[in-house]
Amino acid sequence: MDAFQRHRSLYKGTTPPWKEAYRQRCVDRLKNSRSRLLERYRQMGESQQRSIVQEVMEEEWSALRSADHRLPSLWGADGQAETYGVMKEYDELAVLEEIQQELMFQEMSMIEEYERNLQFEQQYISSVVEEMEETHIICPVCRVNNLNITSCFISCPCGLHLNTKQNFPPDVLQQLLESKMSEHTDDCPHNPAFFVAPNTESSSNLMISCKVCDFLSIVL
């Protein structure tokens, strides 16, 4: 019996000691890889492989192996589950499959949240377009009134008042609002809010923020 087989025989019929640490590391890495997942999701079609679960599991397994060299490689060079073939008689196979299923479920939840947030963004933009007059945009702060845009002044009955100090066409303002919404949506599934804040030049800025992810940015 070689060293690898002796290592496996110790844990046959029991929960491997590395299970919880490996599972938590995979969960954390998947959460931290949200941007990578969504970027791949946007670039690939529905029918193409867009999951990063295998990559996450392999990366964390490599990190685990650096601390315990008795563990085998998780996937071989051909992409096949090398460890699965060795572990098929042991409970460790079931553990890996359990972790993989959990990660796939969390990955799908991230994608569904992104789709819901994207739908909200599209609905918001559509509502702006529907309510937009020739030179007006729905106020991003109250989302009720049309903005009054005159030369370098932008105002709303809700109290919003901005001096852009230069001519600011409505289409440019609309592009800025959409850009900031998209920038936030890429990393957070929750809805942001717009507000006006004074700056150091005795004027005001239109800001966008999110209390959930601490996103904060100047729109104009």
Image (spheres, rainbow, N blue to C red):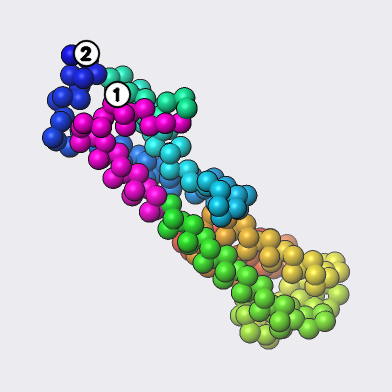
Q: Earlier in the sequence, mark 1 or mark 2?
A: 2
x%, y% of residue 21? 28, 37
Residue 146 shown left or right of residue 60 in the figure: right
Hey, what amino acid is under mark 1? Leu
- Image depth: mark 1 or mark 2 in front: 2
Quadrant placement of the N terminus:
top left
Q: What is the secondary structure assignment of the residue under circle 1?
A: loop
Q: Is residue 92 magenta?
A: yes
Residue 167, percent from left and from top: 86, 69
For residue 80, what is the image quadrant? Answer: top left
Residue shown at 58%/59% (left/top)? Answer: 184
The foreground one among 86 and 146 is 86
- In the rendered structure, which segment of residues is drawn in magenta? 79-106
Check disc 2 and report the residue beneath it: 2
**How many badges with numbers are in the image?**
2
Q: Is residue 216 visible?
A: no
Q: Which residue is mark 1?
A: 71
In three-dimensional space, the C-alpha distance between marks 1 and 2, rounded to whole angstroms, equals 13 Å
**Alpha-carbon neighbours of circle 1 within 10 Å: few (<14), some, or many (≥20)?**
some
